[in-house]
Image (cartoon, rainbow, N blue to C red):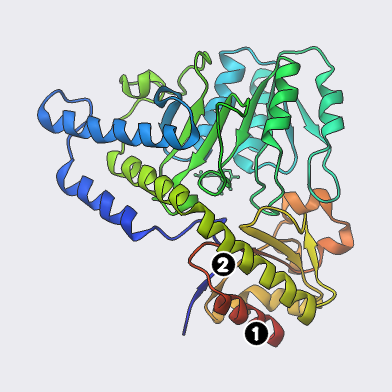
């Protein structure tokens, strides 16, 4: 049975070149980068080369890249230190952020008594910029945290525009860029964002490694304490093989970006066209012109079919993720769709299809055939 993986917003398959690079480091460059002997110096050198390579792709300095264990850690660190050490009194975010941001903001609200405000979301899942400007008219030491690309519906935030608004209002701007790093160009000299985060397993790198971009002189302090690694901002022996794998994955993502993006866009359009023909009553959650790697759809299925849908697809070897919601009542509705859809639509079966360059039109055909048989 041919298996079909269309859940690339959850995680991606590693590129073979990344695995090769990591194996080499594990076999040969196993020194501790903090050791002063040749093994350590060698590990330190590959570590710093990786940092430089990542910085080059984002047009920032190597010192502004801090390695973390994942995107979740990087988000937690930035938000928590902003409140604790930079004395941020208010976080403005949105209800459709990833839980790594939402739950952190909620925890900080309880622990530090800060104010958390949520920007209004439009029907297509985009941020209401006028509402953001309105919220920013309140004088308070503020950090705005808004994600670049939504992981469930693929809506895209105009980072440059929001960054400019934040700076005009003299507030800090953090963006969870986990879904877009490696999949769209980002020039950090041009985009006025103070903090962004990334996670290697979303761009065909290894799991368990990510990074934060922290603009120079930010004043952030570490989340926990130990050695001097990462300038003391993220102590703990560096996972050199993971970091090298992440840098290689990012390099390959950007080297192949144009080709991969046009291939994936073609697949996404192909799926939209086939849905329009086979299921004319289906709807797109979010925006038809949303980010090219994600398509979130509502299907016109009955409740019984809804309950069976994912199991049915899984039995046919097709991996997608649920775009919604309260099918069979046993699973909590998506917090993202709950912000956008009516009660009625929330009951309809949703699918999040998320693509990578490894997918083919044949994969979409298999998905469509399976959906038609449900
Ligand atoms: N932020 C977004 C938008 C994500 O999609 C994810 C992954 O699901 C994360 C954060 C968390 O990243 P990680 O798996 O590296 O902790």
Q: Could you classify mark 2 by the number of other residues whose Cα lies within 10 Å: few (under 14), some (14-19), or many (20 or more)?
A: many
Q: Residue at x 61, y 81 (%)?
A: 365
Q: Quadrant of ligand 1?
A: top right
Task: Determine the image quadrant of residue 326.
Answer: bottom right
Residue at disc 1, CB closer than 8 Å to ligand 1: no
Relative to residue 106, is residue 71 depicted above or below?
Answer: below
Q: Residue at x 74, y 74 (%)?
A: 273
Q: Which residue is mark 2?
A: 6
Residue at disc 2, CB closer than 8 Å to ligand 1: no
Count of residue discs: 2
Where disc 1 sits, the SS reads helix
Residue 181 showing in the rendered view: yes
* Marked residue nearer the N-terminal end (2 or 1): 2
Residue 369 percent location from the top left of the image:
65, 84
Relative to residue 367, is residue 194 depicted above or below?
Answer: above
35 with respect to 16 (left or right): left
47 with respect to 3 (left or right): left
Q: Which residue is mark 1?
A: 369
């Amino acid at each position: 049975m041919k298996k079909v993986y269309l859940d690339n917003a959850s995680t991606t398959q590693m590129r073979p070149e990344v695995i090769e690079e990591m194996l080499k480091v594990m076999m040969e460059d196993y020194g501790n980068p903090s050791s002063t002997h040749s093994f350590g110096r060698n590990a330190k050198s590959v570590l710093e080369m990786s940092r430089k390579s990542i910085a080059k792709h984002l047009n920032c300095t190597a010192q502004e890249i801090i390695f973390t264990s994942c995107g979740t850690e990087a988000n937690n660190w930035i938000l928590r230190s902003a409140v604790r050490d930079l004395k941020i009194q208010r976080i403005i975010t949105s209800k459709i952020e990833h839980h790594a941001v939402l739950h952190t903001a909620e925890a900080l609200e309880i622990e530090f008594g800060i104010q958390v405000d949520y920007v209004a979301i439009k029907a297509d899942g985009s941020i209401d910029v006028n509402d953001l400007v309105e919220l920013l008219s309140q004088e308070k030491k503020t950090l705005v945290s808004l994600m670049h690309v939504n992981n469930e519906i693929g809506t895209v935030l105009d980072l440059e525009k929001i960054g400019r608004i934040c700076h005009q209002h003299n507030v800090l701007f953090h963006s969870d860029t986990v879904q877009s790093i490696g999949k769209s160009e980002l020039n950090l000299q041009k985009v006025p964002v103070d903090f962004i985060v990334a996670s290697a397993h979303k761009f065909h790198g290894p799991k368990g490694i990510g990074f934060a971009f922290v603009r120079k002189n930010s004043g952030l302090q570490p989340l926990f304490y130990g050695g001097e690694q990462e300038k003391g901002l993220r102590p703990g022996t560096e996972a050199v093989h993971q970091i090298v794998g992440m840098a290689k994955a990012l390099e390959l993502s950007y080297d192949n970006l144009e080709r991969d993006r046009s291939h994936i866009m073609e697949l996404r359009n192909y799926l939209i066209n086939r849905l329009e023909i086979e299921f004319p009553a289906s709807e797109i959650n979010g925006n038809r012109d949303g980010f090219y790697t994600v398509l979130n759809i509502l299907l016109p299925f009955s409740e019984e079919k809804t309950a069976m849908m994912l199991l049915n697809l899984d039995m046919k070897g097709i991996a997608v993720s649920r775009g919604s919601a309260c099918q069979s009542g046993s699973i909590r509705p998506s917090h993202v769709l709950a912000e956008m859809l009516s009660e009625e639509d929330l009951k309809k079966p949703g699918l999040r299809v998320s693509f990578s360059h490894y997918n083919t039109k044949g994969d979409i055909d298999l998905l469509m055939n399976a959906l038609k048989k449900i």
